[in-house]
Amino acid sequence: MRTEGRAKRLPRAVRERQIMDAAVDVFSRLGFHSASMDEISEVAGISKPMLYAYLGSKEELFATCIRREATRMMEAIASGVEPDQEPDVQLWSGLRAFFGFVGENRASWQVLHRQASTQGGPFAIELTDMRGRAVSLVAALLTQSTKAPATKLEAESLAAALVGAGESLADWWLDHPEEPAGVVAARLMNLVWMGFGDLVDGNVWHPPSRR
Amino acid sequence: MRTEGRAKRLPRAVRERQIMDAAVDVFSRLGFHSASMDEISEVAGISKPMLYAYLGSKEELFATCIRREATRMMEAIASGVEPDQEPDVQLWSGLRAFFGFVGENRASWQVLHRQASTQGGPFAIELTDMRGRAVSLVAALLTQSTKAPATKLEAESLAAALVGAGESLADWWLDHPEEPAGVVAARLMNLVWMGFGDLVDGNVWHPPSRR
DNA sequence: CCTGGTACCTACTCGCGAGTAAGACTACTG
DNA sequence: CAGTAGTCTTACTCGCGAGTAGGTACCAGG
């Protein structure tokens, strides 16, 4: 029993990381309600009371997961966008960063999008907050660069639609993982920038320079 | 106690309708897991064993709700679209029908979109099925009318993005109910048909005739 | 060797909710 | 008015999972 024996007596910070990773994994697979604290503790290689001692109740744990993953994702997107560029280039960078993140963090995405959005508890707040930041980002991009969306409401709803299209396409992508991230991102870029009207006529959007 | 006394001894078909309505209501408010059979039976004005006698287990009941609401919605959309028209007109009719349905059936929409999509059980099948039909509808519209989406995969993913944008915008609309359905539909139509590129230049899409 | 503190565990309590047993009440049929 | 088919209820069982009580092992410093 010595071989690969349980690593014992780790410091608190390390355990917390392990627990969070296990929690994201389990929540993403089972969803909030179906996930049990017993299973999370098992995956984390730890006993249940430790879980409660370190991360609090189930709801607190879930909210902490949401916040951590949401922050990671928003940072990934923000780091990919340069604010002084042309609107289409900014949008393109954002889409690439977004799909890149989702591709490399499937579990995080499941937790964020599928699970958090349906639980009505304190999670919705975290999630709505992040989603709101994303929508504002896009809405700002729109209003800043055009005279078309006259009202604030209009820009916001268009941004909501775009964000939703991105989320939905990311979900679709989970079922078609053979497609590379760049291709999926480009497709959405064409849809929202050119529109079907142009695509029908064979007009497509190209990134400004081969980077 | 005679006043407004409980209506007693109704025939089975009527009770089943009442139960289904109550179930859709409760499921849409609480979600599948948090909804209890006790509450559904209470809302339906009936005792729990009746529920089990008529509609079976909780899972069966939920699946039945999904199927009923999905059918209603697809019929609403199909009845609004005429297959021999121009692609943009078809899309426009579909969008109007969709938002019209959601606007008048908030609870149905909640059950269909928010609840069913996250439960991994047999419901996903029902839901994925309906969603698939919607996506196929749009994908057919695309391939039929253009040379742009070369691959089947491409058309399908674009359709998924469009459907997702619609779903997301419908969710956004739930939080901004003061907007009329037609305005929201027109906004999405502009986004996906014209694209931001055109909208930035002030080019908008107009319905072909004041109907 | 004791004293305290931190990591860690086994083994519970306890409420909630799915599902059921067993029968009662009503209404129609002959 | 007996018989029977269908409606409807009260009052349970029972498992699952959140949260906890009450310890044990291990490592400081004195």
Image: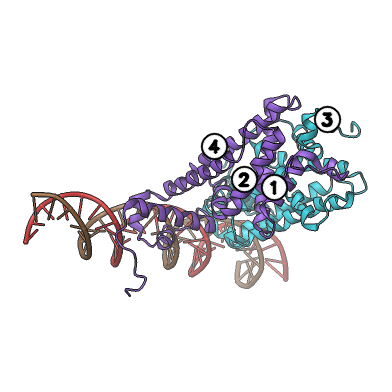
Chain colours: A purple, B cyan, C red, D brown
Q: Which residue is mark 2?
A: A98
Residue placed at 77% from the left, 30% from the top? B200
* For discs 3 and 4, the disc positioned in front in the rendered view: 3
What secondary structure is found at the residue carrying circle 4? helix
Mark with earlier residue (4, 1)? 4
Q: Contact (CB < 8 A) between labels 2 and 1? A: yes
Q: Which residue is mark 4?
A: A129
What secondary structure is found at the residue carrying circle 3? loop
Q: Is residue A52 left or right of residue B44?
A: left
* For discs 2 and 3, the disc positioned in front in the rendered view: 2
- Chain for numbered disc 3: B
Residue placed at 79% from the left, 39% from the top? A194
Residue placed at 43% from the left, 52% from the top? A20
Q: State the separation of the CA atoms marked 4 and 1.
A: 24 Å
Q: Which residue is mark 1?
A: A185
Q: State the separation of the CA atoms marked 3 and 1.
A: 24 Å
Q: State the separation of the CA atoms marked 3 and 4.
A: 33 Å
* For discs 3 and 1, the disc positioned in front in the rendered view: 1
Name the foreground residue: B137 vs B115: B137
